[in-house]
Image: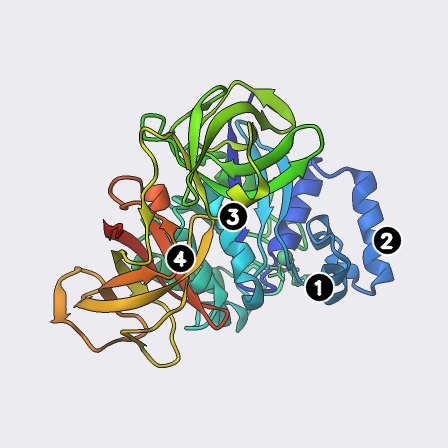
Amino acid sequence: MADKPHLNLVIIGHIDHGKSTMMGALLIQTGAVSEREARELEKIAKEYDRDTWSYAYVFDRLKEERQRGITIDLAFRKFETESKYFTIIDAPGHRDFVKNMITGASQADAAILVVSGKKGEMEVGLAANGQTREHAYLAQTLGVKQMVVAINKADVWDYDEKRYKECVDAVSALLKNIGFKVSDIPFVPVSGLKGENLTKPSDKFPWYDGPTLIEAIDKFTLPEKPLDKPLRIPIQDAYRIKGTGVVPVGRVETGVLKKGDNIIIEPGGFTGEIRSIEMHHEEIPKAEPGDNVGFSIRGLNMEDVHRGDVLSHPDSPCTVINPSGNWTGQIIVIWHPTAVAQGYTPVIHAHTAQIAAKFIQLNKKLDQKTSAVIEDNPKFIKKNEAAIVTLSPIKKLCLEKYEDIPELGRFAIRDMGRTVAVGIVKDIKTGA
Ligand code: GTP
Ligand code: MG
């Protein structure tokens, strides 16, 4: 497995559209999940009186997930295609757990957007408050560049070409609007529950001559590694490990981290030397973009490192915005019960950071498609409107200009458990 190139693949889409079921079935068909494990899951599903959920149980492993029949937390599993090996990140569709979906998508190189073609379900997902829409926007913002769309539950829509086309048209329109290049996105009709068109062409779709799901994901290209950029590792978490000390973990976004390097952890400013780097429980001499690693640093304490911090080299440290500073961003409002106005202080999600920030200025309202200025200094920005705005964080926040380091130059704005807007960083005034 280790010889093949690796990709992180996140599975996204509206609740109950069949993400976990489809990926569970795919893993069983490829043998990544053994027959024995599959039979055990069937038995457990029967015990919960949820016979048809056994495939989903490949990913849904928490008791609460199995009882309620929903995904809550991210689940990771490895699996390989002909040319690559993948870490599958199964995300929850439930709107209460979008935070977890964001964490999953922020680690992903590519996504499968699962859309149930069942009458009514496709429509609900695409509606203004649907998670097909919300997840697609977030995937774009979080830098997921490649996507496959699976039009699922074909057994329910009778493998009907007309319904398939309806779904493809509706989803294409959304993705195009968001800024995806739709001509590069394969659409694949499947039934996860019946296992159709996942790993073998299905005779249920005589009208379809495109790839199976596994062929479609095998064609994802490897992202170019931004090796020449300055080092940036957003911290996901930190653990205290006996005998080793405090071990922060994170994914290298840009640059290269080597054993022995001097580093700085912002915004706290801790400096130290990398003692060792570990990936998949093995020590490695250096880490490159895309690698999920843990590292030990001489003298590091738990107070020195937090989720949302960024590790870089002291000679090219990441940009830190102080509460006296601000950044200007271009945003698109996805949802708001009324309108966004000056003074509004929602939570910003950027890489692994989550921090409240205040809208200190609404600079311009833009035409969403052409970016032409429609209005200067607008009083409000409403749903589906694009704007240039200035925000100030209530605590220090690591961010970069999108044009310098896109990986750290995107953000989502969330409030009341929903995504309000997504955006990119145009300019930064660090303050202080
Ligand atoms: P969340 O993770 O909670 O967002 O849901 P999910 O998208 O992972 O959906 P899940 O796989 O849990 O399936 C939801 C329901 O849809 C279950 O009852 C499945 O049995 C059913 N289902 C999933 N795929 C199919 C399918 O292809 N055909 C039919 N008929 N039902 C399906
Ligand atoms: Mg699920």
State yes or no: Cβ of the residue under disc 1 lies below 8 Å from any atom of ligand 1: yes
Question: Which marked residue is nearer to the observer: mark 1 or mark 4?
Answer: 4
Q: Name the residue under label 1.
A: 69
Badge 3 crowding class, 10 Å Cα cut-off, few under 14, some 14 to 19, many 20 or more, is some
Q: Are marks 1 and 4 in contact (CB under 8 Å)?
A: no
The residue carrying pointer 4 sits among few (fewer than 14), some (14 to 19) or many (20 or more) residues within 10 Å by Cα, namely: few
Give the distance between the C-alpha atoms of the residues marked 3 and 1, in whole angstroms: 30 Å
N-terminal label among 3 and 1:
1
Disc 3 designates what residue? 307
Beta carbon at label 2 within 8 Å of ligand 1: no
Residue tagged 4: 395
| Depicted 343 relative to depicted 110: above or below | below
Name the image quarter holding the N terminus.
Answer: top right
Q: In this rendered view, identify the residue nearer to me: 195 or 30.
A: 30
User: Disc 3 to disc 4, how far (Cα)?
Assistant: 14 Å
Q: Are the residues at dot 3 and dot 1 in contact (C-beta closer than 8 Å)?
A: no
Q: Position of residue 48 (x, y in %)?
A: 83, 63
Left or right position of 421 against 309: left
Q: Residue drawn 17% across and 60% down?
A: 371
Dot placed on the residue nearer the N-terminal end, 3 or 2: 2
Looking at the rendered structure, the secondary structure element under dot 4 is loop
Question: Which quadrant of the structure image shows residue 328?
Answer: bottom left
| Labels 3 & 4 near each other (Cβ < 8 A) | no
Q: Nearer the viewer, mark 3 or mark 1?
A: 3
Note whether 203 is above or below 226 in the view shown: below
